[in-house]
Amino acid sequence: MKGDITYRYDWFLNTRTSASLSARTSYQRTDYIHEGDYFSDFNDITCTLDGNLYYYFSPRLKASVGLLCFYKWNDRVHIASNSQFHFGNQIGINYAIF
């Protein structure tokens, strides 16, 4: 069984600036029946939030700033539980040749 919810919103603040924000949550559970016995193998939850800001100096040249926040939790029955958190950022300058 797997479920996934995603939301994304884009803003055009003016003719040179745009921004985007997205949020995503997913859940996955694996169950199975083997020789008449019911087993729950693992659960997995992932949450992601990211945003970007773009500034266009010209139609070919743009600057960008991006942020990402990511959390993941999983539980493997009879093995281990695990959780991870990640935060990242990115700054860039892009120039289109064509």
Image: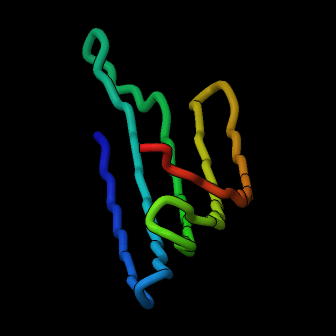
Q: Eyeballing the image, is 56 above or below 38?
A: below
Q: Eyeballing the image, is 32 above or below 12?
A: above
| Residue 11 place in picture, x, y as percent | 39, 82
Q: Eyeballing the image, is 6 above or below 97?
A: below
Q: Residue at x 46, y 78 (%)?
A: 18
Q: Residue at x 35, y 69 (%)?
A: 7
Q: Residue at x 56, y 75 (%)?
A: 55
Quarter of the image for the C terminus: give it.
top left
Q: Residue at x 48, y 59 (%)?
A: 60
Camera-side residue of 1 and 55: 55
Camera-side residue of 50 and 2: 50
Seen in the image, is 79 located left or right of residue 20? Answer: right
Q: How many marks?
A: 0
| Residue 72 place in picture, x, y as percent | 61, 49
Seen in the image, is 79 located left or right of residue 18? Answer: right
Camera-side residue of 56 and 12: 56
| Residue 29 place in picture, x, y as percent | 39, 39
Coloration of the structure image: rainbow
Seen in the image, is 7 located left or right of residue 16? Answer: left
Quarter of the image for the N terminus: give it.
top left
Camera-side residue of 33 and 48: 48
Seen in the image, is 64 located left or right of residue 43? Answer: right
Q: Residue furthest bottom?
A: 14
